[in-house]
Image: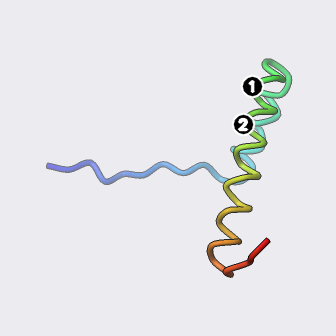
Amino acid sequence: MFNLELKIPTYKEWKDQLEKLKKEQPEQAERYYEQVQKFWQDFFEDSFNIKK
């Protein structure tokens, strides 16, 4: 009834895809990298209640 299969890449697979993106579309890769950095910054601030 439900498809609960979740496919999460390994770190190596993710990094390989990011390197490929950097070569093919550097501007898009830069935006993606900024979003990833913002995600982790927000995650740690929220998790550890870090105030700026």
Q: Is residue 5 left or right of residue 35?
A: left
Q: Residue furthest left?
A: 1
Identify the amino acid type marked 1. Gln
Q: Nearer the viewer, residue 43 or 12?
A: 43
How many circles with numbers are drawn on the protein?
2
Other residues around mark 1 within 10 Å, as few (<14) / some (14–19) / many (≥20): few
| Numbered circle sitting on residue 47 | none
Q: What SS does tag 1 mark?
A: helix
Q: Position of residue 46 (x, y in %)?
A: 63, 72
Q: Tell me the residue that label 2 is attached to.
A: 32
Residue sitting at x 20%, y 50%: 2
Q: Residue furthest front?
A: 52
Q: CA distance from mark 2 to mark 1?
A: 6 Å
| Residue 52 in picture, x, y percent from top left | 79, 71
Residue 18 horizontal/vertical position (percent): 76, 36
Name above or below for residue 32 compared with residue 47: above
**Tag of residue 28:** 1
- Taking the image as shown, residue 2 lies to the left or right of residue 11, namely left
Which residue occupies 65% across, 53% down? 10
Q: Name the colour scheme.
A: rainbow
Q: Residue at x 48, y 48 (%)?
A: 7
> Which residue is at 72% across, 52% downward?
38
Amino acid type indicated by mark 2: Tyr
The residue nearer to you, when weighing 14 against 30, is 30
Circles 2 and 1 in contact, beta carbons < 8 Å: yes
Q: Residue furthest top?
A: 24
Q: Residues within 10 Å of mark 2 (few under 14, many from 20)?
A: some
Secondary structure at badge 2 equals helix
